[in-house]
Image (cartoon, grey):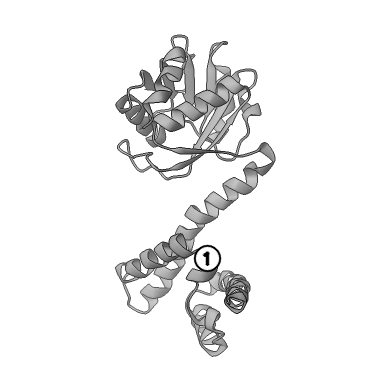
């Protein structure tokens, strides 16, 4: 937490958090812990009459309606990774999207990266101050890059879980429990975090072992045939990554 950001927030305080879901509750708790004056989390429809800053911690589809309910003259922010700030018109607006998942009110925002935006210098300064007091590192994401940024986040988080679900289902057909895969998944993610995708890649595709890949494909066709197209797409993408890996190795003196 950077306490130097508190005066910026106190000038416009208190902060009203609208949305009493997991993210709204976690934000309210974390901001209060950081010394920020907080109201809420409140339900949708709150007008923010007694607040200087309003944070809309609501689903993307509800942001526009929630923003329309806010009284004029407030700085209004959303937490969406996919939407730009036009959804908050006509308010002076900002955006903060923490690159994290929130499972409960006790979630910590420390060391998390957050995409920041603001329609004015003052609004952007408030977004930066909120990120600072929560211990987050802010990065600017342009409106034209927003969809690509959010898709990257979805691939990194949501699609990873989908792939692990596929692995879990296939392992179950061989009598292997999900827990047996956990150390492998953790080590893989740690290697990727430390070394990057190309350097962390292992397995039969990276080795060019097409015989083993063909056996794997036959097993999937037999046991989870509805996932065969996904397997084929992943093999092709992994071959591309393996080619990058080999090119990097060749280029190393």
Residue found at the far right of this picture: 144
Q: Position of residue 96 (x, y in %)?
A: 51, 33
Instruction: Please report the residue visible at 49 percent of the width from the left and 82 percent of the height from the top.
Output: 219
Instruction: Please report the residue visible at 58 percent of the width from the left and 72 percent of the height from the top.
Output: 238
Q: Quadrant of residue 214?
A: bottom right
| Residue 239 in sight | no
Q: Position of residue 65 (x, y in %)?
A: 57, 23
Q: Is residue 142 above or below residue 162?
A: above
Name the side, left or right, on which 220 lies relative to 26. Answer: right
Q: In front: 118, or 86?
A: 118
Q: Is residue 193 above or below residue 98?
A: below
Q: In front: 5, or 64?
A: 5
Q: Quadrant of residue 31?
A: top left
Local packing at callout 1 (Cα closer than 10 Å; few below 14, some 14-19, many 20+) is: some
Q: Position of residue 93 (x, y in %)?
A: 58, 23
Q: Secondary structure at mark 1?
A: helix
Q: Quadrant of residue 229?
A: bottom right
Q: Quadrant of the N terminus?
A: top left
Instruction: State the residue position of label 1.
Output: 197
| Residue 222 in sight | yes
């Amino acid at each position: 937490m950077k306490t130097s950001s508190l005066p910026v927030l106190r000038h416009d305080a208190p902060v009203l958090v609208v949305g009493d879901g997991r993210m709204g509750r976690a934000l309210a708790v974390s901001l209060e812990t950081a010394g920020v004056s907080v109201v809420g989390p409140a339900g949708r429809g709150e007008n923010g009459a007694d607040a200087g800053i309003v944070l809309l911690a609501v689903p993307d589809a509800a942001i526009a309606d929630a923003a329309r309910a806010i009284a004029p003259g407030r700085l209004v922010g959303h937490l969406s990774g996919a939407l730009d700030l036009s959804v908050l018109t006509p308010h002076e607006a900002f955006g903060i999207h923490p690159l994290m998942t929130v499972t409960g009110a006790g979630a910590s925002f420390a060391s998390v990266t957050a995409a920041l935006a603001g329609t004015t210098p003052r609004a952007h300064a408030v977004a930066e101050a909120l990120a600072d007091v929560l211990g987050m590192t802010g990065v600017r994401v342009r409106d034209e890059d927003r969809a690509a940024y959010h898709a990257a986040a979805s691939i990194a988080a949501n699609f990873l879980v989908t792939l692990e679900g596929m692995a879990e289902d296939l392992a179950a057909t061989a009598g292997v429990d999900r827990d047996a895969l956990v150390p492998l998944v953790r080590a893989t993610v740690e290697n990727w975090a430390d070394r990057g995708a190309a350097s962390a890649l292992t397995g039969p595709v990276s080795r060019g072992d097409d015989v083993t890949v063909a056996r794997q494909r036959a097993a999937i066709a037999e046991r989870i045939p509805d996932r065969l197209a996904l397997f084929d797409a992943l093999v092709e993408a992994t071959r591309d990554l393996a080619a990058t890996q080999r090119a990097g190795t060749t280029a190393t003196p």
